[in-house]
C-alpha cells in the first residue's frame, strides 16, 4: 500500500538524540515526483528540551507553556522540515509558524506539516502557480469516539459511503477526518480563512488505488467554487492513517 503512494528511503538517525527519533524515512510522492517528504517516528518518553540544542533547532517562545507531547511533536516535525528544506536548497531556513499557526515557508517553496503522538511528516516542493500541498497524520480513533467524530465531520451520504468501504469503522472515520484536514491545509494558503468539515464531501473511496475524492460543497474563492473536485491519497499504518492532497 505504501509503495503505491510514496517512494521511501531510510535516512541515518541524528547523533546525540538518545533514542528520541527512532526511524527516519525520506523520498518522493509517486504521482507527484517533484514533491519530497521527510518522515520521522519518535519516542515521547525519550524527549527532553535539550534536544533542541543538540539538533541545532531554535526553541520557540510559543512552546514555553506547552506540554511535553506538544514539544516533542514540534521538534520532530521541525527536524524533518530542516532536512527537507536543505534538500530543496534552503539549508539555513528554520520553519516557524505565523499568528494563524500555519507554517511560514520560504517564498519559493510550498509545503505542509503534520504530526501525531509518534510520527511527524513534512511534504514540500518548489512553488508553482496555485500548487496545493496538504498532509495529515492521525492516530486511529477508538470505536467509542466514532459517534462524536461522525457528528463533527461527515454528512449522511458520507456515513453510508464509509460504512460500505470495507474498512473497519475506526479506520474509515479516521480516514475521513484526516483527508479533510489535509484538504484544509492544502487550501488555507490560497483561501486564507477558516472553513469547516462541511465545506467538502467525500464522494468516492478506492482501497485498490489508495485514493479518496472530495467535492467542495460551498464556494471558498472564485478559483475554488462549489463542486471543485480534489483527489487525495492515503496510507493505513497499524496505529495511524496518513493522507495527502497535492494539486
Image: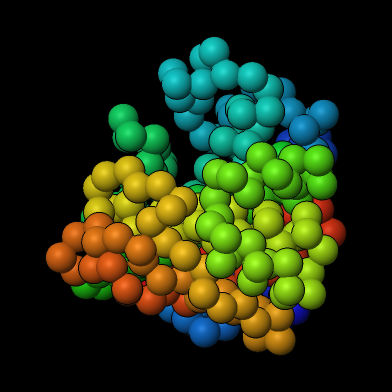
Q: Is residue 125 above or below residue 18?
A: below
> Left or right of 94: which side holds 77?
right
- Residue 70 spot, x, y in % from top left: 61, 29
Say which residue appears at 68% left-offset and 73% top-offset: 8
- Residue 61 spot, x, y in % from top left: 44, 18
> Left or right of 94: which side holds 151?
right
Say which residue appears at 51% left-offset and 74% top-offset: 203
Q: Is residue 10 above or below residue 19?
A: below
State the residue in front, 129 or 227.
227
State the residue in front, 68 or 217.
217
Tell how many labels.
0
Does residue 180 appear in the picture of this structure? yes
State the residue in front, 169 or 237.
169
Quarter in which the N terminus is drawn: bottom right
Say which residue appears at 74% left-offset and 28% top-offset: 47
Quarter in which the C terminus is drawn: bottom left
> Left or right of 10: which side holds 224?
left
- Give the image quarter of residue 161: bottom right
Say which residue appears at 73% left-offset and 67% top-offset: 163
Does residue 134 appear in the picture of this structure? no
Q: Residue furthest left?
A: 222
Amino acid at each position: 500500500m505504501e509503495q503505491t503512494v510514496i517512494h521511501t528511503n531510510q535516512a541515518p538517525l541524528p547523533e546525540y538524540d538518545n533514542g528520541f527519533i527512532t526511524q527516519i524515512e525520506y523520498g518522493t510522492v509517486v504521482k507527484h515526483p517533484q514533491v519530497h517528504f521527510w518522515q520521522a517516528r519518535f519516542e515521547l518518553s525519550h524527549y527532553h528540551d535539550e534536544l533542541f540544542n543538540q539538533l541545532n533547532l531554535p526553541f520557540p517562545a510559543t512552546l514555553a507553556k506547552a506540554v511535553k507531547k506538544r514539544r516533542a511533536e514540534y521538534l520532530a516535525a521541525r527536524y524533518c522540515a530542516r532536512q527537507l528544506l536543505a534538500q530543496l536548497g534552503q539549508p539555513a531556513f528554520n520553519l516557524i509558524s505565523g499568528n494563524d499557526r500555519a507554517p511560514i515557508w520560504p517564498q519559493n517553496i510550498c509545503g505542509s506539516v503534520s504530526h501525531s503522538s509518534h510520527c511527524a511528516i513534512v511534504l514540500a516542493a518548489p512553488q508553482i502557480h496555485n500548487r496545493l500541498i496538504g498532509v495529515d497524520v492521525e492516530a486511529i480513533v477508538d470505536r467509542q469516539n466514532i459517534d462524536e467524530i461522525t457528528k463533527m465531520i461527515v454528512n449522511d451520504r458520507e456515513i453510508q459511503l464509509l460504512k460500505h468501504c470495507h474498512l473497519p469503522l475506526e479506520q474509515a472515520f479516521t480516514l475521513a477526518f484526516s483527508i479533510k484536514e489535509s484538504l484544509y491545509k492544502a487550501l488555507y494558503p490560497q483561501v486564507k480563512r477558516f472553513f469547516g468539515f462541511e465545506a467538502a464531501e467525500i464522494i468516492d473511496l478506492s482501497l485498490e488505488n489508495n485514493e479518496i475524492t472530495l467535492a467542495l460543497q460551498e464556494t471558498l474563492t472564485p478559483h475554488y467554487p462549489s463542486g471543485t473536485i480534489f483527489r487525495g491519497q492515503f496510507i493505513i499504518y497499524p496505529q495511524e492513517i496518513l493522507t495527502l492532497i497535492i494539486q
